[in-house]
Image (cartoon, grey):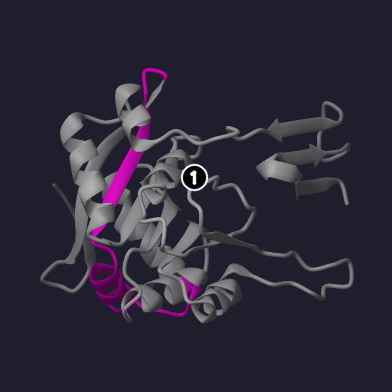
Amino acid sequence: MPLGDVRLGNGIRVHVALPPISVGGTTISVRVPRAAGLSLDQLAAAGMMSAAQRRMLGAAVAARKNVLVTGATGSGKTTLLAALLSLARPDERIVIVEDLAELQVRHPHVVSLEARQANLEGAGEIGLARLVREALRMRPDRLVVGECRGAEIRELFSALNTGHDGGAGTLHANSLADVPARIEALGALAGLGTDAIARQAASAVDLVVHVARSEGRRVVAAIGAMTTDASGRLRVDQS
């Protein structure tokens, strides 16, 4: 196996590529998360969002709105999501499902579940879709999927549509306008057509927060709400 991706303690991720896959020689990439995530106020003070956006996001968490944070790789999705979750009431149980555990949430009641890859014999895999179903048996007050990248989006949207409010997740997308196409693609992996995933998404997600890198800074570029157009296709209207 010339490629490896593992998580060490405290969310440190190590990726290794060996020759001949890595043409120039062995490559080791280490991603070290912050020891303690920044609060929403600290992110606002650092210029990630305006005062109005800070108030809107804080109110969304307090009202137990379902939030989807979108953006490109390295745009700050996980950082913002952790800050939002830290605003949850201390008596609420947050159950987090991730492919690789990264979310560092400053909250007294967090349960973190991590997916497992298959072994060399191809057995033992536990994917995100199953973990979402298992998480629902753990009495979550807030269900969180660290990053939606496959069929687990069906389970997440189904849960958020059946009384599990206050949930959240992240999604890779280059812009707010690209979010519907990305959700449709993931819905197809789960066996859902465009109309079905559009209805699920529009009903499940109350707020879409898109983050981006601008002039070397991570910023909240846009905030929108999901809806469907006259033809039943998913769209995101910017607030």
Left or right: 174 as drawn, with respect to 98: left
Q: Is residue 158 above or below residue 34?
A: below
Which range is magenta?
A: 188-216
| Vertical position of residue 105 compared to residue 27: above or below | below
Q: Nearer the viewer, residue 201 or 161?
A: 161
Q: Position of residue 35 (x, y in %)?
A: 60, 33
Q: Residue at x 75, y 39 (%)?
A: 14
Compared across the picture, whether 23 is left or right of 131 comes to right
- Residue at image mark 1: 106
Q: Residue at x 25, y 55 (%)?
A: 62
The stretch drawn in magenta includes residue 190: yes
Return the x and y of residue 13 as percentages of the image width and height. Answer: 70, 41
Q: Nearer the viewer, residue 163 or 28?
A: 163
The stretch drawn in magenta includes residue 150: no
- How many numbered discs sit on the rendered protein? 1
Image location (x, y in percent) of residue 36: 55, 35
Image location of residue 238, percent across then percent down: 16, 47
* Residue type of the residue flagged with mark 1: Arg
Badge 1, how many Cα within 10 Å: few under 14, some, many 20+?
A: some
Tag 1's secondary structure? Answer: loop
Residue 234 as seen in the image, left or right of residue 90: left
Q: Residue furthest left?
A: 230
